[in-house]
Image (cartoon, rainbow, N blue to C red):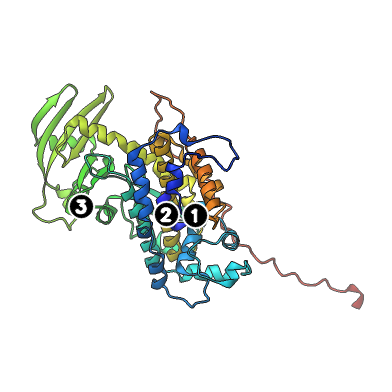
């Protein structure tokens, strides 16, 4: 969090205060010494120091502004607009007016040296901000999002044998019923006809150690140009750090996904359906077995059906893989295929961590309200989606820093609890005074450390569909009242 907020939202001089002050109190408001509750960790000290030294490499604001040069008197530069878009997404899509008034009250550190900003005399009208949002190019927004995401992912050490593991999964979101969006992302249809809500398919890769999300790949869920989750995999894995491990559920346990990962120089660990696994196991060679598990070696080639659905596969495409059959209990057997050399027990333990992506996707969609992006054009939707990913990753990184201080795993802290703490103590008060920032950050970190989920060993939670909010009253355009003729004067008759 120090790494991110220091550059994106203006915090300075936090690393030393967080870890090396003897008297760590909240300006006398709480009368408690937080650091005494947390043992000193030399490795964590080093991480904070390195993060503090590497602030300049997180987001190159000057470079972003030079990509969209404006006049010297401009207020809504590219960096300012990006900051305001993240603020909106952090507050579940707050209005343009809210963002403009927040800029007037608490401008970010990288604002241009403008007299109107300094004296807080700029207009609260949203027209200039609205035009600046439209003027901002998707390329600049993507560059900004990539810089933040890459920096945050790099801040966490790899979780498995010095390699990064990415959990890939898909989800859908619905957009405003605007003709431009409906054309690119057609609504769903049934026997009664076509709906009105454009549906977007997202494929998201979450990094296992940090919980941060990479830039998602998107496509239409319905219509003549509809794509599947597996069709988006190739583009998704190409943007991930080299030599990563790609993990996916049974929907992704097919040759084309494994081949796309291999071509991008990644390894893979994919779950398979029972029928698909047995189809390969019949031709495979049993190499190892133990109590409740078996491992096979196999040269995997695409089936005739896969070649038909993926005609771009090379004629000589094949993968040397290991098939793992692990009996979890009497009613559940795990079927895995992997290019890794680990044992069946190791692969099962690694795959078990995949369950985290379910709550990660929920946090991105529901808690940050990404499923209700109110953009009215395709280009604006792309910008808001990218800044939603930045907002999500900022909260995830803040949770990770709080968990490090509390000696907990990041997902032991409630995402919703940390998010509300982030909003109330940091995002609502973007102070320019470093001393005030330090107090706000300390207060936020203190409460975030205590947003701990209850420990309920042995409790299982079946997969359920999240209840969607009713949208029938959203985006209804106001209609002009019908014209009424003036009453006739009866006395003239």
Q: Position of residue 240 (x, y in %)?
A: 27, 53
**How many neighbours does mark 1 have within 10 angstroms: few (below 14), some (14-19), or many (20 or more)?**
many
Read off the residue under disc 1.
89
Q: Quadrant of residue 465?
A: top left
Label 3 vs label 1, nearer the camera: 1
Read off the residue under disc 2.
390
Q: Are marks 2 and 3 in contact (CB under 8 Å)?
A: no
The local secondary structure at tag 3 comes to: helix
Read off the residue under disc 3.
260
Would you place residue 136 above or below residue 459 in this image? below
Sequence order check: which comes first, mark 2 or mark 3? 3
Q: Are marks 1 and 2 in contact (CB under 8 Å)?
A: yes
Q: Position of residue 3 (x, y in %)?
A: 40, 51
Sequence order check: which comes first, mark 3 or mark 1? 1
Cα gap from disc 2 to disc 3, whole angstroms: 26 Å
Q: In which quarter of the image is residue 327?
A: top left
Cα gap from disc 3 to disc 1, whole angstroms: 32 Å
Q: Quadrant of residue 277?
A: top left
């Amino acid at each position: 969090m120090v790494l991110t907020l220091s550059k994106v939202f203006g915090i300075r001089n936090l690393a030393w205060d967080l870890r090396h002050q003897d008297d760590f109190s909240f300006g006398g408001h709480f009368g408690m010494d937080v650091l005494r509750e947390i043992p000193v960790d030399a490795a964590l000290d080093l991480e904070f120091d390195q993060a503090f030294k590497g602030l300049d490499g997180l987001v190159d604001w000057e470079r972003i502004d030079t990509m969209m040069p404006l006049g010297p008197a401009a207020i809504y530069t590219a960096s300012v607009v990006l900051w305001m878009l993240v603020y909106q997404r952090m507050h579940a899509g707050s209005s343009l007016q809210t963002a403009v008034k927040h800029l007037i009250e608490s401008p970010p550190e990288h604002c241009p040296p403008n007299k109107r900003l300094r004296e807080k005399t700029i207009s609260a009208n949203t027209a200039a901000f609205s035009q600046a949002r439209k003027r901002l190019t998707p390329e600049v927004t993507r560059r900004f999002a990539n810089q933040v995401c890459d920096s945050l992912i790099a801040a966490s050490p790899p979780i498995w044998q010095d390699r990064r593991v990415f959990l890939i999964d898909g989800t859908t979101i619905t957009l405003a019923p605007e003709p431009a969006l409906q054309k690119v992302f057609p609504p769903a249809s049934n026997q009664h006809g076509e709906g009105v809500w454009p549906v977007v398919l997202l494929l998201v890769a979450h990094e296992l150690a940090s919980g941060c999300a990479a830039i998602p790949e998107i496509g239409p869920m319905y219509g003549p140009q509809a794509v599947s989750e597996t069709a988006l995999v190739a583009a998704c894995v190409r943007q991930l750090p080299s030599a990563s491990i790609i993990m996916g559920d049974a929907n992704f346990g097919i040759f084309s996904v494994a081949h796309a990962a291999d071509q991008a120089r990644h390894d893979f660990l994919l779950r398979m359906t029972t029928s698909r696994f047995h189809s390969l196991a019949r031709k495979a060679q049993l190499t190892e077995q133990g109590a409740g598990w078996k491992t096979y070696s196999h040269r995997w080639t695409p089936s005739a059906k896969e070649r038909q659905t993926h005609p771009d596969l090379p004629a000589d495409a094949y993968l040397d893989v290991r098939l793992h059959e692990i009996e979890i209990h009497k009613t559940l057997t795990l079927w895995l295929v992997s290019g890794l050399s680990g044992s069946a027990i190791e692969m099962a333990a690694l795959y078990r961590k995949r369950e985290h992506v379910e709550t990660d996707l929920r946090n991105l969609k529901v808690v940050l309200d990404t499923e209700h992006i109110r953009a009215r054009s395709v280009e604006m939707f792309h910008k808001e989606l990218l800044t939603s990913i930045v907002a999500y990753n900022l909260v995830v990184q803040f949770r990770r820093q709080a968990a490090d201080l509390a000696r907990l795993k990041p997902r032991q802290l409630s995402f919703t609890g940390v998010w509300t703490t982030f909003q109330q103590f940091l995002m609502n008060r973007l102070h320019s005074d470093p001393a005030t920032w330090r107090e706000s950050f300390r207060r936020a970190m203190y409460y975030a450390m205590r947003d701990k989920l209850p420990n309920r060993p042995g409790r299982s939670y079946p997969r359920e569909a999240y209840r969607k909010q009713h949208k029938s009253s959203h985006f209804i355009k106001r209609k002009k009242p019908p014209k009424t003729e003036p009453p006739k004067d009866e006395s003239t008759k």
